[in-house]
Structures are given as C-alpha cells and as structure tokens.
Image: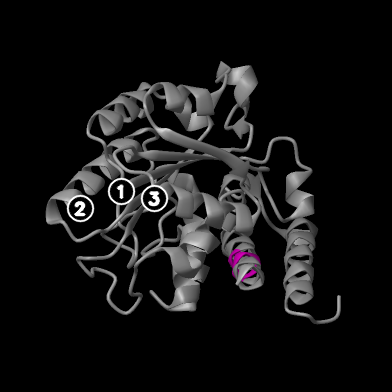
Amino acid sequence: MIRELERFAARIRLETVKQIGKRGFGHLGGALSVVDALAVLYGGVMRIDPKNPDWPERDKLVMSKGHAGPALYSTLALLGYFPMEWLDTLNQPGTRLPSHCDRLLTPGIDMTTGSLGQGVSTAIGLALAQRMDGKGARTYVFVGDGECNEGQVWEGAMFAASQKLDNLTLFVDVNGKQLDGTTDEVLELGDIAAKFAAFGWHVQTIDGQEAAAIQAAVTAASLVPNRPSCIVLNTTKGAGVPSIESIELNHHLPMEGEHLETALRECEKTLRTLEGGTV
C-alpha cells in the first residue's frame, strides 16, 4: 500500500512539472512540497467519488495555500475528475485550471482559495456544516508556514478549538520558505506545533515527505474526539525533484529549456524506480 502511494506521489510530481513547464513558469516549489500528503489523502484516506465530484457526503479539501493548485490539479486529473489534457492549459486564457484554485471552474475543487489565511476560515465553515449534516464527513486544509504570518489563521485556530471540530484536520507545510525569503527572515514563527497545541488542538509533527508517517498521522487524527487536529509537515520546498530543491529561491520559477528537461528526467527516473523498471 505504501509503495503504491509513493508511486502515486511520483506521478503527481511528474504531471505537476509538466503542467508548469507548459506554462513556462509557476509556483513549483510549494506545489511539490505537499505532493506526498495529497497522494496519501486522495490515495485511500478521503471519502470521494471522482465520477460524482459534488457528492454531498464526500470529504472535502481546502488548499488554503492556493498557489499549490497545480499539485492538486495533477492529483484530480490522475483520478479521473477531468481529462488529463486539461493540465496543458494551466493558467491559459479560457482555462478551467487557473493558477489558484477555483471551485466554480474545476471539478473536484471544494473551495476557491488564494488569499492567504482565508482558507482556514472557509475550511472551518465546511467542517461546521458537515457536523450539522451528521454524515461523518471530514474536512482537510493545507496552509503554508509563511501563510501562518496571517492573523486570520490564528483566529480560526481559536474558533475551531472552541467549537471542538474533531472532523477538521489542518496540515501546515513547513518548508521554511516563502515569497520573499526564508520564513525566519521574513517573520520568525517559533514553534508552530506548540502554538496550535496552546490553542487547544491535537498536534503531531512528522516528516511530510514520508507516506507511511502521513498515513499514520491522519489515522491518529481521525480518532481524537472533541478537538481539531493539526499535522505539522516538515518538508522541503521543491521536494522530490533535486534540481528544484537545490534552488535557493524556488517559490516561483521559470520552467523551460534545459532546466525543465532536467526536472522531467528526475521525475521520470523516480517513477521508473518505484515501478520496478530500469533507471
């Protein structure tokens, strides 16, 4: 099972690099760092139906760090939510796949995001509604560590704990970088896990690039009563693609020429290895 999740993550990475390569530039670093968690969630954890994206009883996911949308698009396309050919249209005129997630355009997107911090509030609203419906559905939300500069994140953290939203799981993608530099340079965040714990959340800190650790943490979170859960993902910006990982400022990158070809070769090599082929 874990091997299959790793293969799924490798496919997501490859398609995400291809997407941004077609556009020529994009938010690749922070998209790649959440791929492993997306693979785990959509690879067996979440209650979903790609043939019925609006199924009322489905689990929902909010990509509050909306610039990671390309990774989510790759995930959804691989599951059959929409044709793979759509990935070639990322952020092009008339596309159904804008640079940031839009629920009115893309099948499988549960919430429009992009204004950082606001996804936490909307995810809380979804979780409250799900609890009122009484159908056992859960909400998952991704925020970036740089996004935690936003006060709205912490207002939401206080509210979710007060409402005992045990059907809400929040992932903090701690890759150490944001648009203008490292998170420590821009605004030192301190101990994010301790902060969420102080607000009353159940908190786990794990390797955000390890499928087994992610799966175990998500399972543990689902069993905690009367508290929302926070899973702190220690990640690498550009994870899984060495040539992208090695770039110091890799929040938004041009992707073309030899730079693109190198990244594609790295992704294809990883996928072949996981599928048991020759390298």
Amino acid of disc 2: Gln
Callout 2 environment at 10 Å: few (<14), some (14 to 19), or many (20+)? many
The residue positioned 74% from the left and 71% from the top of the image is 268
Q: Name the residue under label 1.
A: 167
Quadrant of the frame with the C terminus: bottom right
Q: Which amino acid does label 1 sit on?
A: Asn
Looking at numbered disc 3 in the image, what kind of residue is underneath it?
A: Leu
- Crowding near the residue tagged with mark 1, few <14, some 14–19, many ≥20 C-alpha atoms within 10 Å: many
Q: Residue furthest right?
A: 279
Q: Is mark 1 on a helix, strand or loop?
A: loop
Residue 9 in magenta stretch: yes
- Name the residue at 67% across, 41% down: 250
Residue at screen point 70% across, 58% down: 256
Circles 2 and 3, Cβ within 8 Å, touching? The answer is: no
Find residue 159 and report its horizontal and vertical position in percent.
26, 28
Q: What residue is drawn where x is 31% and y is 54%?
A: 138
- Marks 1/3: CA–CA distance: 10 Å
| Residue linked to disc 3 | 223
Write the start and end of the magenta stretch as one range.
8-12
User: 170 left or right of 225?
Assistant: right
Q: Is the Cβ of the residue at disc 1 closer than 8 Å to that at disc 3?
A: no
Estimate the x, y position of residue 75 in percent, counting from the top left.
49, 66
Asked whether 211 or 268 is in front, the reply is: 211
Q: Real-space Cα distance between discs 2 and 1?
A: 8 Å
